[in-house]
Image: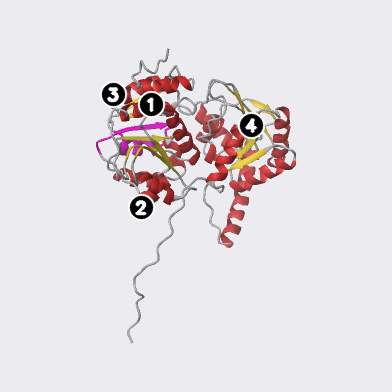
Amino acid sequence: MNYFEELGIDKRVVANLSQIGLTEPTPIQTRAIPAALDGRDVMGLAQTGTGKTAAFGLPIVTKLLEIGRRPNPKTCRALILAPTRELATQITENLQKFTAGTPVRSFRVVGGASPNAQAQRLSSGIDILVATPGRLIDLLDRKAVKLNEVRYLVLDEADQMLDIGFIHALRKIAKLLPTERQTMLFSATMPKLMDEIAASYLTNPIRVQVSPPGKAAEKIEQGVHFVNQGDKAKLLDDYLVQHPSELALVFGRTKHGSDKLMKLLESWGHNVGAIHGNKSQGQRERTLQAFRDGKIKVLVATDVAARGIDIPDVRHVYNYDLPNVPDNYVHRIGRTARAGKAGRAVAFCAPAEFNDLKAIEKVMKAAIPVIGGTAPSGAEANAAAKDAKAKQGQRQGRGAAHGQKQRPEGQPKRPARRPSRRPKRTKAA
């Protein structure tokens, strides 16, 4: 028996769910799907890995199947916004599984792919458009797509869209959407700016919360290992050699640092790959597929991959560098213990990161068990953090001297300023 049919999901979709092994809804799905089918705006709060894609995707597909005619050229009926290419890809793949054998078509538009090819695909209209905000703005500026016929809107992982600087893009997109629409917003945390987003997009929403914001999945075994920054690589090697056949995801803070760590681990004999914002879309997809297939056992990634990696076989997550945004810790470790499996998350904490650790524990409302090393004193931690900040300033100063502007990983580029067309004023003779 498939319980999704009892929730009101179309029988054709339910048959597809049965084929991929989805027969019993998760708590977020049980609460969000009936409200969505009733046409209510939904604000869903749930930790990563709880099945949010099906919570908004299944009711949208069910409603689209009732329309019975093709969308108009350059339009979409449902728009799903996601912060990263990986998450947009994951959503699209799931939707295509849900809609197999039905007339509903979904399409993904992200950076790193040809905008001309994407514009061509959109020219005939699409049922469900999954997009990152930056690329959607590009296509809107090209007049390749119109949003005036959007009936259903989803903001997935809205908190991360705010973290990486998409607030201005979201404001611009909001002005182009029809007021008569159904909107669903899903997030794992509730930063302050979320109130503005909710007010701009949602109308009298029903709030669905299945776990406190900032809480990690129960099946994740967590631990923190205190270590000097220069000893982290060797410590990571020690952990990896203990489980050579299991998939491990390693999070670094910077693109350059992640590449450097990948090359070092490779020189030590590990089968390793890396993904971050400097990699092309093709490179990222090939590396993720190799990791998913087990051809790569260790994947080094920046926070651009903290959400959107849905690989049930990831057994270990190593926070090589602690995130400077505390909420990102929960999203990172949520890459393990998926699909009911158990997982392990180890955080490497250098003295300069001790305050970051305390901020993470404050968000989680729980202390992470110490499994190695000795915590620094408050004075040691403050001195180390001050020294690290000074060194970072020196590196940024050197970059600026060479014309290199520093931009946080995942933050959209600011468009180049157009040259003025005004004629230069000349002094009268």
In the picture as drawn, the residue positioned furthest to the front comes out as 101
Judge left or right: residue 182 versus residue 139: left
The quarter holding residue 11 reads top left
Image colouring:
secondary structure
Judge the density around disc 2: few (<14), some (14-19), many (≥20) Cα neighbours within 10 Å: few
- Identity of the residue drawn at 57% across and 44% down: 283
Judge the density around disc 4: few (<14), some (14-19), many (≥20) Cα neighbours within 10 Å: some
- Identity of the residue drawn at 57% across and 21% down: 341
Where does label 2 land, which residue?
141
CA–CA distance in space, label 4 to label 1: 30 Å
Please tell me whether residue 174 is drawn above or below residue 10 in the rendered image: below
- Identity of the residue drawn at 45% across and 17% down: 23
SS at mark 1 in the image? helix
Magenta segment, which residues?
179-202
Where does label 1 land, which residue?
58
Where does label 4 land, which residue?
294
Residue 385 image point, x, y percent: 61, 43
Q: Is residue 355 visible?
A: no
Where does label 3 land, which residue?
38
Residue 334 image point, x, y percent: 54, 29
N-terminal of the pair, mark 4 or mark 3, is: 3
Residue 57 image point, x, y percent: 39, 29
The quarter holding residue 428 reads bottom left
| Residue contact at pointers 4 and 1, CB within 8 angstroms | no
Q: Is residue 17 visible?
A: yes
Residue 188 falls inside the magenta stretch: yes
SS at mark 3 in the image? loop
